[in-house]
Amino acid sequence: MMSTNESKEDAKTRVTADKLMKVYDSCRELNEEFSAGRRMSSICSDGDDCNSSLLPRPENWPQRPLLLRPTPGAGMNIRGVRYSSSKTYLSQYEEVQNLPINNGLEARGNCLVIDFESDLFIGTVCLRLKNARRSACHGNDRDGSSNDLSSLNYFQNKKRTFQAIIRGRFKKRIPMSKCVTGQMFTRPAGALPPRFIVKAAVLLMSRLAPQLQSRLEGECPRFLSPLCSTAQTAYIMKKNQNTDEDLEDELQEPHPSAPSSFIQSLPQSSMENHPVLLDTDNKARIKKRKKAFDKLYSNGSVEPSFCPQSEYCFEFFQHLILFDKFSLDFPKPVGQHSLKKMLNGQPLRMLAVHQEEKGSKVEKNKAEEMTRLWSFDIWHESLYEDAINNDATNAADLQ
């Protein structure tokens, strides 16, 4: 039978989860922020043994206290960094240990974008973090510092604190249902909040991401969800159809009947009658895509697939992480909780992978293979000492 303490704890978990959901629902209405399933996009693979290899000292981080870099050992090739309005790479970023973070105050055409390539994907990423330190390339009048910055602030009147847009093409056909995004770590988690808060948070994430794979315990904790239903905005286009300046605009989910909609990739989509509501309601269009691709993922369908002849755009944003403070910002009564102790010297990541199971259908314990589509580490200086200590411990264990 359930003990009195366990009963009280479960009741407290449900109450906290319900409060979180109420606050979350109200945030969805604020400033028309469509968020039918907000989730942070980052991950690391179980086999990555150089998680913090050669991490520069924080005093050498151009945008301290934050540092963005490609994940070591993930097969990421950085082709160059440029302004969204230019095709010329900036010499300041020939050192790929320090990649640029935009803070939302850049004038149109002056966001810094990163061209990259992996074994399966080639594309461009534009990252915005609220309250990030100004990039050295934005330290002059080029980004409109002489104007009223309030008119340039991407994050003004928005609840979100993070936005990442990835656009590019796949190098070969890959089943859409086999691509996931999320969080995944190579070491156990550090000190977590009280158990009832953790359970409430996992319950909240499960409500927002019905196909969430979550594992808190063990050597390699992780949270993964389908790429095509996790993205806040997603659309398809012909190669070279748009300019990179379009990445700075407010992205809109295409109508399900439009050729650019992911819905058009599904069987019988052209024959489906769509509600009139979808003509004007962006949130309804997003919800329809998410529901369709959650179902596709749960069925394990091998089609449709990403096609090398098309380009794909994914937008992600979230509001629970305050990157300048590096803390989780839960509504009351939970409040803010530092990420430092939780992460155990590991970075957050924005990443997507091709997830494959190896073995026959009758095998219970199938081998899992993760191949990176993209992978970038987001470090905060508060993680540095723990990361260095962990590396020293790992080096000692190998001797």
Image (cartoon, rainbow, N blue to C red):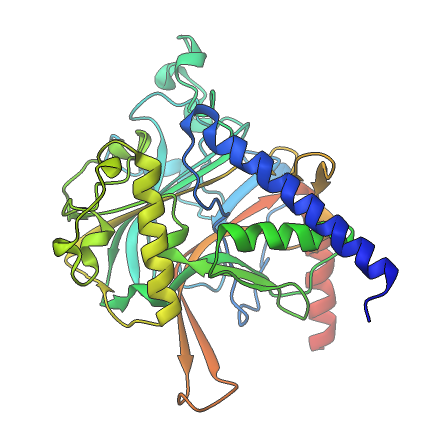
**105 displayed left or right of 188:** left
Q: Is residue 17 above or below residue 393?
A: above
370 and 197: which one is in front? 197
Residue lying farthest to the top in this orientation: 147
**The N terminus - image quarter:** bottom right
Residue lying farthest to the front in this orientation: 1
**The C terminus - image quarter:** bottom right
**78 displayed left or right of 49:** left
Coordinates of residue 27 in the picture (x, y in percent): 52, 31
Residue that appears at 35% across and 71% down: 299
Residue lying farthest to the right in this orientation: 4
Count of labels shown? 0
Q: Is residue 335 above or below residue 16?
A: above
191 and 390: which one is in front? 191
In which image quadrant can residue 19 be found? top right
Coordinates of residue 366 in the picture (x, y in percent): 48, 84
Any part of residue 61 in sight = no
Residue that appears at 17% across and 49% down: 273
Q: Is residue 73 above or below residue 289?
A: below
Residue that appears at 36% across and 54% down: 291
Residue that appears at 47% across and 21% down: 157
Q: Is residue 342 above or below residue 267?
A: above
Coordinates of residue 11 in the picture (x, y in percent): 75, 52
Coordinates of residue 142 in the picture (x, y in percent): 35, 18
Any part of residue 235 in sight = yes
